[in-house]
């Protein structure tokens, strides 16, 4: 039998006492099979702390999601899988710290990785940093037909619409060695944007049975290829959740697509969950991890000057969130460039003081739009920084400060193109 671990391994959803281990077998018989797994305290697997078997079912594309519990908080572990005589590559993971911990958390943020647009070099550098956790804020795959002038080609060049289509698209992406290295380097906590289903979709789309079948297929394929704690049910998949790192950072991941309608980005239930958490959390940093540009961004030129697909399409909902949590930090993506913004209660009042910060991550590989950055910066004084390199974000949240580095790719590799710190109000650029 050929190597069944061609899609790599991953871990995710860290808790203080547990983690999810993931793989997906390829080329195996179309029936349930058993996979063995091991979790060790060292890279050589001399100290095994947990091990067992998991069933890989054909109806879930032979994906495996192992829930490991009873682990030490804030600890590093290593894991691997075995099927027959084949052993997977080993992955590194880390549990979240004890709820009373004040230890800093090192995180990375990535998004927008259209396969045909370029290589995943950013992930090679992200993996080398070995962060405590990686957040992904959407467009893990693109459903569209193969782009013109591809840097590399898809297996299926048409638009993904069926479960088989989406599975094939994920398999193509996940065969990339740099993406596999980033998954194997640290636990991931992902959320989605639109291209995991269809460009700019919202909620139930046109409400047709055909679209709902397509959305359900896309959600299932997403689950099958990522280390999530919950399975799809009834055509939906609960994605909004929090991952708390001691008393330092409360990362709240949002779903800006599944419950969206003309009057709301999040839907009533998700918004109430978020506002309640923002009001009650005792943790130092309240961090929104979500795909879309959060600050107001007026784009000079032809209308629409405010992009309705971003949070500018829901200013009242944004205002309620900002009012619930002074000192909010938002980590975003979607627009294929780096940006850094100060958040304000009134973006149109130049005297309105900053009450939070947003750091927008560039794309891993997706091509950038044409952007008149000087005009945008001139029209939006609260937007403090722009950079057009492909890349990712690398950050550290500690008891007293929140620091973010915008990483950009060039011929020499990955470098810090800008670095900022925030004390919960404005942002200060750090010389690098």
Image: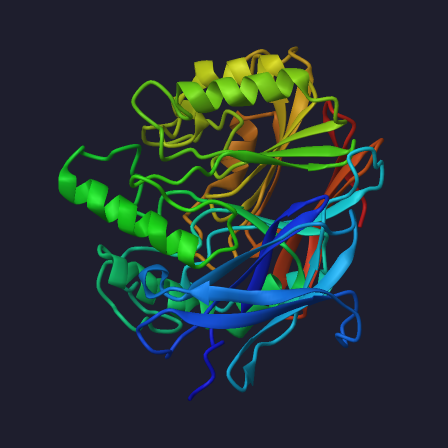
As drawn, is 47 to the left or to the right of 26? Answer: right
Where is 52 relative to 212, above or below? below
Residue shown at the point (15%, 39%) measured from the top left: 209
Q: Nearer the viewer, residue 155 or 168?
A: 168
As drawn, is 336 to the left or to the right of 304? Answer: right
Residue 140 x/y as whole percent: 44, 54
Residue 45 x/y as whole percent: 75, 74
Residue 65 appears in the picture as rendered: yes
Residue 121 appears in the picture as rendered: no
Where is 271 relative to 254, above or below? above
Q: How many marks?
A: 0
Residue 243 x/y as whole percent: 63, 38
Q: Quadrant of residue 154?
A: bottom left
Residue shown at the point (56%, 17%) measured from the top left: 275
Residue shown at the point (43%, 63%) measured from the top left: 63
Where is 399 relative to 338, above or below? above
Position of the N terminus, as image quadrant, is bottom left
Residue 241 x/y as whole percent: 54, 34
Looking at the picture, the colour scheme in use is rainbow
Q: Nearer the viewer, residue 408 or 39?
A: 39
Q: Quadrant of residue 264?
A: top left
Q: Nearer the viewer, residue 78 or 361?
A: 78
């Amino acid at each position: 039998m050929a190597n069944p671990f061609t899609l790599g391994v991953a871990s995710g959803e860290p808790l203080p006492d547990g983690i999810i281990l993931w793989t997906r077998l390829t080329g195996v018989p179309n029936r349930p099979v058993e996979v063995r797994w091991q979790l060790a305290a060292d890279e050589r697997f001399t100290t095994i702390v947990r091990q067992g078997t998991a069933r890989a079912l054909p109806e879930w594309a032979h994906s495996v999601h192992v829930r490991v519990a009873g682990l030490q908080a804030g600890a590093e572990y290593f894991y691997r899988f075995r099927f027959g005589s084949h052993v997977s590559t080993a992955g590194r993971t880390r549990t979240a710290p004890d709820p009373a911990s004040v230890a800093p958390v090192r995180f990375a943020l990535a998004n927008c990785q259209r396969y045909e647009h370029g290589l995943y070099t950013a992930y090679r550098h992200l993996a080398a940093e070995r962060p405590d956790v990686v957040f992904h804020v959407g467009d893990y795959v693109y459903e569209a037909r193969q782009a013109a002038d591809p840097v590399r080609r898809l297996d299926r060049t048409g638009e993904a619409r069926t479960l088989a289509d989406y599975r094939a698209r994920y398999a193509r992406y996940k065969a990339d060695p740099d993406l596999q290295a980033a998954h194997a380097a640290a636990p991931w906590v992902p959320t989605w944007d639109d291209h995991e289903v269809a460009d700019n979709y919202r909620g139930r789309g046109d409400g047709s049975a055909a679209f709902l079948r397509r959305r359900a297929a896309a959600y299932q394929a997403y689950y099958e290829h990522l280390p999530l704690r919950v399975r799809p049910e009834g055509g939906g998949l609960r994605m909004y959740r929090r991952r708390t790192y001691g008393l330092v950072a409360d990362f709240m991941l949002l779903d800006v697509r599944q419950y969206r309608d003309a009057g709301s980005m999040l839907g009533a239930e998700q918004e109430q969950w978020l506002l309640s958490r923002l009001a009650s959390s005792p943790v130092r940093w309240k961090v929104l991890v979500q795909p879309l540009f959060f600050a107001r961004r007026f784009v000079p030129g032809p209308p629409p000057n405010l992009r309705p697909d971003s949070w500018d399409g829901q200013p009242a909902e944004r205002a309620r969130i900002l009012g619930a949590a002074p000192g909010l930090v938002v980590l975003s993506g979607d627009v294929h460039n780096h940006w850094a913004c100060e958040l304000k209660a009134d973006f149109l009042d130049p005297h309105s003081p900053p009450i939070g910060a947003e750091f927008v991550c560039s794309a891993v590989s997706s091509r950038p739009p044409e952007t008149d950055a000087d005009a945008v910066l001139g029209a939006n004084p609260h937007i403090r920084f722009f950079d057009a390199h492909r890349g990712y974000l690398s950050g550290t949240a500690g008891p007293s400060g929140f620091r973010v580095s915008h990483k950009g790719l060039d011929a020499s590799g990955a470098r810090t193109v800008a670095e900022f710190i925030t004390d919960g109000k404005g942002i200060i650029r750090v010389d690098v």
